[in-house]
Image: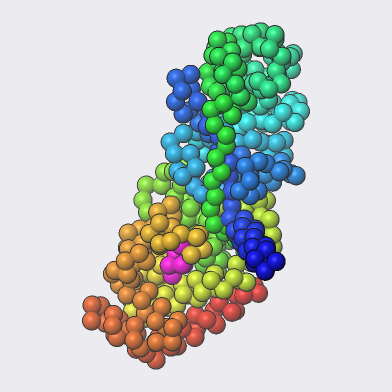
Amino acid sequence: MAEFTIARGQAHTACAARAECEIDCLYLGRQPILTRAGTLAAYELLFRGGNINRALIDDDAQATARVVVNAMCSIGVSATLGSHQGYINVCREMLFDDAVLLLPPERFVLEILETVHVDASVIERIDLLRRVGFCVALDDIVDLSDELISQLPHIDIVKVDFLHADRARLPALAEAVRAAGKTLVAEKIETRDDYALARQLGFDLFQGYFFARPQVLSARRGDPSRQSLLRMLALIASDAPLTELEFELKRSPDVVTQLLRLVNSSAYGFGRRIASVREAILAAGTRQIARWAQLLLYASSGDASWRTDPLAQLAGARSRFMELAASRVRPDDERFGDAAFMTGVFSLVHVLLGEAAPADALVPIGLVAEISDAIAHRVGLLGALLTIAEAAEAGKQGQGACTACGAHPELAALTPAVVAEINLLAAAWTLTHEHA
């Protein structure tokens, strides 16, 4: 009985650990789409609420929003798609939401769900999206209908559901789509016979369990403050000065993390690394930031603020300490102060993202070498400031500065008394904004 009790307790602990992990993680399903030659052409990206490889969807729009956020910000476009395209399911609500324009059209195909009634307004919206560069696919087609024939001039891809299509009518369907010059995708291919039939009928691309089940990707959950996102949107809507938007972002380290992932995704192809919050804003543009913030709000599954997380509070206090210390060392160098703040923000991002080492977490964010090297290797003046900040957090205000002064004489300005003062100001700054 004692052994059974222990085993049951261990099983309960394991289940609790798995549940906690699922709460802390974001998930994304990814199923390959193959060419006639058997090579990878694209992935369909699928909503997953946990590590169980099936979708439990209550809200199509929210499911799509979460897929977009996870692909663009949390996991990253490069890690999700590599050099390939991604197909994303879009319901009517998301089709008409400008947040869909957050997606780079050359990387993503909009797959119109079969539940969408394709009326004149939908056709008009599809035409607009195609004009800005999107390819549009119709999903789960099972037969050649008058509606499909009328829609063909307005779309690019037809995905035929082999599980439910009438085999006798498949040749006519395939012939009509090919005659219209559209790409034919055979989906839900589960047997070798279905694959052979699809190839015989001239299908271009293939997807289904016969080739591969969806793979589940995951990343540590970042939960940006909903209030911070709302304040950002309000600032953008009121055409507030760049300095106000910059200040709002600086108050929310996790929001900055998401913004950096967005800006440095392969989708944007920004030509240089980011060294400050202001550069990130300028790189993305306020309109794009507004779309991104709206999508994050849409995808959010809770109201918890980063300010209730001790680790995030530490990141906020550290970033403020770094900024204040930089202003004492180089009082006339605003850029250095920005870089110091960014170093503090991202010095703990590997913990927030569940990575073992800082260097692994910093790769998709795309920081300048001065900042990433300071965090990963403690080199340069920023690395020395980070060492001083960590010593101050441990109550060793004098030790860190004394050690760093030998390599960086500028740091002589950071006496133990100054470091103690800055540490107190940084902590007070974080508390001041805790309930803002």
Q: Nearer the viewer, residue 407 or 31?
A: 31
Q: In this view, does 376 lie to the left or right of 171?
A: left
Residue 379 location (% of width, % of height) = 29, 68
Q: Tell me the quarter of the picture where residue 312 sits.
A: bottom right
Taking the magenta stretch, the answer to whether it contains residue 235 is no
Residue 250 location (% of width, % of height) = 52, 67
User: Is the residue 389 above or below the residue 292 in the image?
Assistant: below
Taking the magenta stretch, the answer to whether it contains residue 345 is yes
Q: Tell me the quarter of the picture where residue 305 sits.
A: bottom right
Q: What is the quadrant of the C terminus in the image? A: bottom right
| Residue at far bottom of view | 417
- Main SS of the magenta part reads helix
Q: Tell me the quarter of the picture where residue 167 sits.
A: top right
Identified at 66% across, 36% down, the residue is 90
Q: Which of 287 and 181 is in front in this view?
A: 181
Identified at 28% across, 80% down, the residue is 404
Q: In this view, does 379 lie to the left or right of 436?
A: left
Q: What is the quadrant of the N terminus in the image? A: bottom right
Q: Nearer the viewer, residue 244 or 423?
A: 423
The span shown in magenta is 344-350
Identified at 56% across, 43% down, the residue is 216
